[in-house]
Amino acid sequence: MFTNKFIRGLNIINEITVTDNKEIGTHMDIVAAFKDLAPDLESFIVEFAFGDIYSREGLTKQQQTMATIASLVTLGTEPQLELHINVGITIGLTPKEIVGTIVHLIPYVGFPKVLNALKIVKKAFAQRNVTIKDLQMQSN
Amino acid sequence: MFTNKFIRGLNIINEITVTDNKEIGTHMDIVAAFKDLAPDLESFIVEFAFGDIYSREGLTKQQQTMATIASLVTLGTEPQLELHINVGITIGLTPKEIVGTIVHLIPYVGFPKVLNALKIVKKAFAQRNVTIKDLQMQSN
Amino acid sequence: MFTNKFIRGLNIINEITVTDNKEIGTHMDIVAAFKDLAPDLESFIVEFAFGDIYSREGLTKQQQTMATIASLVTLGTEPQLELHINVGITIGLTPKEIVGTIVHLIPYVGFPKVLNALKIVKKAFAQRNVTIKDLQMQSN
Amino acid sequence: MFTNKFIRGLNIINEITVTDNKEIGTHMDIVAAFKDLAPDLESFIVEFAFGDIYSREGLTKQQQTMATIASLVTLGTEPQLELHINVGITIGLTPKEIVGTIVHLIPYVGFPKVLNALKIVKKAFAQRNVTIKDLQMQSN
Amino acid sequence: MFTNKFIRGLNIINEITVTDNKEIGTHMDIVAAFKDLAPDLESFIVEFAFGDIYSREGLTKQQQTMATIASLVTLGTEPQLELHINVGITIGLTPKEIVGTIVHLIPYVGFPKVLNALKIVKKAFAQRNVTIKDLQMQSN
Amino acid sequence: MFTNKFIRGLNIINEITVTDNKEIGTHMDIVAAFKDLAPDLESFIVEFAFGDIYSREGLTKQQQTMATIASLVTLGTEPQLELHINVGITIGLTPKEIVGTIVHLIPYVGFPKVLNALKIVKKAFAQRNVTIKDLQMQSN
C-alpha cells in the first residue's frame, strides 16, 4: 500500500524528529494539520523531502541538518528553524555545533537574522533541557 | 604592527583561499580592490570575519564552509558563492559533499536558487580540475 | 473633491475587501490606522495601488488576486497574505484555487514559505466558514 | 522502466516548454546539464516538480504559469523567470496577461524587481516574435 | 582590561540606545541574553558593530540610523527595526524623518514591508510619547 | 495636457538624474524602453514615484537618496543601485557619504551584499570621474 519511498521517508522522519517531549512537533504533525487543505502534502513531504532528498548518499544526518539550519537562518522562517534545531539535538549535533553554525553566519547574513535565530535556539535548548554545561563540552 | 587578531585572520585566509590557479580570487584580492574606497574593509574582513568568526572553536573548517555555502545558496549572491565553493575544494570538502549540500536545500529554498548555484559549481569544478570520478568517490 | 482615480480605487477596494465579518480588516482600515503618521498613504493606496494598478485592463480580478497571493507567499509578509486570501474568497477564487496557487509554489520557494502560508489559509477559511466540502468542489 | 509519474511529468514538460526555437532551453536541458553533478535531479524535476506538482488538479496550466511567474518576479531569479515567460507564451497566456501579471506586482514588490522582470519579457517576446500588435489584443 | 575599541563601542551604545523607559531594550540587553550561548557576541557587537562600524567617520549618527532603518525595513526583521526606530528618536531624528524614511521606500520594496514597519513605528512612538504634534513639526 | 503631478515628478527626475555622460541612463530612458510593453509605466514612475513619493516634504533629496541606496543594497537589485548611486553623485552626496552608507550596512546585511554594492560604486565613480581625492574630502 505504501511505496518503498514513502516507508524510507517515514523512517527518516521518525528517526530524526520524534522526541519524548510531546510539545515539540514533528513533520507528521504538519502533514496532519493540512490533511484537509492538501492531502497530497503528505506525499510531497514524506516521499520527496525525506524519501528522495534526505535519502541521498553523500552527507551524514548531522551535515544535512547543519546545512538545513544555515539555510533557514538565512531565510528567516522561524517555525521551520525551531523544528530543525530540535532535529539537530535529536540526531546528535552538539549544542556547540548548533550555536556555532548560526554564529558563523554573521558575516554572511548580518546580525539581525542571527540574533533572531539564537532566540529560537534558547527556546529549543530550554525545552530539551540542554544546559550551559552541555554547551561548553567540546564537540569531539 | 599587525594585531594578533589580524595575523590569525590572515593565516586562515591563506590556508583556505590560496590556490595554484591565479584566476581564482582570494579574500585579499577583494581587500585590494576596495583599498581606495574603504581601506578599513581590510580590518573588517581579516580581523572580524576571519580573526574573530572563523577563529571560533566548535566547528571544523569543513563544517564552517558547508554552513557558508548553504547560506550563500539561500542568499543567491553568486560571486561569494563561487569563492566559497573554491574554499570548499581547497579545505577538503569532497565534491560529493559540496554538491550534496546544495541539492539538499531544494526543499527549503526551491529549485531556482539550487540550479543557479549548481551552475557555479560546474564552473568552479572545471577551473579546479574536479572530475566526475572525483564526484563519485565516497566522502569517507 | 475626490479625483476620479480616487473614486475608481475606492470602488475596487469596496468590491474586493468588504465582508460581513467585522474582524476582517479592509484596506481602508489600514489607511485609517496610519492617518496620523502618514495621511498621504490614503492616496498612495487608493489612487495608486487601486485606482492605477488594480484598474489596469488585461487581468481579471481573480487573476490579479492569484498573482498577488503568489507574490506575498514568496515575500513571506503574513498580514498582507491574510488580507489577500480574504480578497480571494470575496472575489470568487475557489478554495481549491487559493490552496492550489500556494501549493504550486513548493518547487519555486520551498516548503517553509508554503507551509507558513497554508497556516494563514486555515485561519482565513475558518473565519469565512469555508469548509472541506467547499474545498473539494471543482473550480469549473 | 519509467514510472508513471515520470512519464506524466515528462509529458507536461514536453507540452509546456518545447518550442521551435532551439535557443530556448527546456527543463530537460537543465537536467542534461547537471547529469554528471547530480543525476537524481532528473527525477526531482520530472517526477516531483512536474509529475507531482504540475499534475495536481485545481489550476489550469495558465493559472499555474501565472502563479509561477509572479513568484519568480518576487524571488528575482532571472534564468528561471525567462524560462517560465517562455512557458507562458507556449501554453497560451496572452502577452497582455504576462505583462499584466508582472506590472500588477509593483505595489507588492516595488519597481526594481518589476523593471528587471520586464527586461526579460522584452528579450523573450523578441525571441518568440511577439509583437506590439499581439500585446494590444484583448485577452478574451 | 577592555580594549580601546570596546570602550569606544560601549560609549556609542550608551549614547544611542539608553532611554528612561526600562521596557525598551538596548544592545547590551541582547548581549546579556546570549551570554551563555555565545559569550563572544559581546565583542562582536560592541567592538565590531559599534567600535568599528559605527565609529567610522563620514556619516553623522542621524545618517547612520537612517541608513540602518531603511535596510531593516527592506529586510523585514522586526525586533531590530523596533530597536533602531528607538535609536532614531534618541539621537534626534525627527518623527517626520523616521516616518519619511520608511514611506519613501514604497517604490523600492512595495507596500507590505512599509506597512509592517509603520506598525512598529506606531508602537515605538507610543512608548516614547511622540505625539502627532511632534510629527507635524518641520525637521529643520 | 500633463497633470501638475506629472510635471512635478518630471522636474524632480530631470533635477536628480540628468548628467553630462550620455551612457548613464535616467528614469525617462526606462520609461522609453518599456513604452510598448506597458505605456502606463510612465505615469506610475513619473506621477507616483516622483510626483507623489519624492515630492513628500520631510526629507532632503540627499536623505531620500541615502535611504534609497540603503534599501537597494539590501535588496541586491544592481541596475537600480547603479542608477541611484549616480543620483547620489548628481544631487550632492559626497563620495564619502555614498561609500559610508553602504559600508555601514555590513552588520545588518552581511559582507556579500555590501561587497557587490561597492563593485557598482567603483564603476559609477569611474564613469563620473570621482577620484580618491574626492573620496577623502570631509563631508562637512
Image: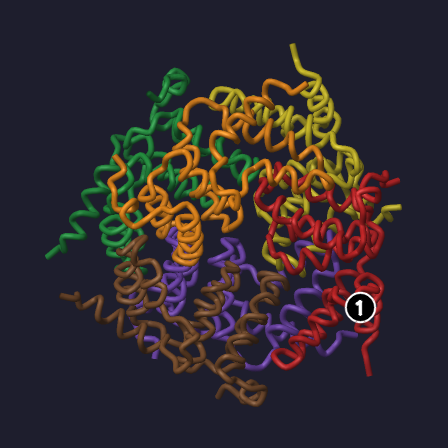
Chain colours: A yellow, B red, C green, D orange, E purple, F brown
Left or right: D27 in relation to D65: right
Q: For the C terminus of chain D, give its image quadrant.
A: top left
* Amino acid tagged 1: Gly
Left or right: F82 in relation to A132: left
Specify whether residue E69 is in view: no
**Taking E89 as reference, is A4 above or below it?**
above
**Taking A128 as reference, is F26 above or below it?**
below
**Taking A115 as reference, is C126 above or below it?**
above
Judging depth in this view, the residue of C89 and B16 nearest the camera is: B16
For the residue carrying disc 1, how many other residues have a C-alpha within 10 Å: few (<14), some (14-19), or many (20+)? many
Residue found at x 84% / y 44%: B134
Q: How many marks?
A: 1
Q: Where does label 1 land, which residue? A: B9
Judging depth in this view, the residue of B4 and E35 nearest the camera is: B4
Q: Quadrant of residue F8?
A: bottom left
Left or right: F97 in relation to A115: left
Q: Position of residue B90 (x, y in %)?
A: 82, 57
Specify whether residue A77 is in view: yes
Secondary structure beneath label 1? helix
Q: Position of residue B99 (x, y in %)?
A: 73, 44
Q: For the N terminus of chain D, give its image quadrant.
A: top right
Q: Position of residue A118 (x, y in %)?
A: 66, 49
Judging depth in this view, the residue of D119 and B85 nearest the camera is: D119
Q: Position of residue E7 (x, y in %)?
A: 69, 76
**Taking D125 as reference, is A28 above or below it?**
above
Residue found at x 26% / y 60%: F43
Judging depth in this view, the residue of C106 and B64 nearest the camera is: C106
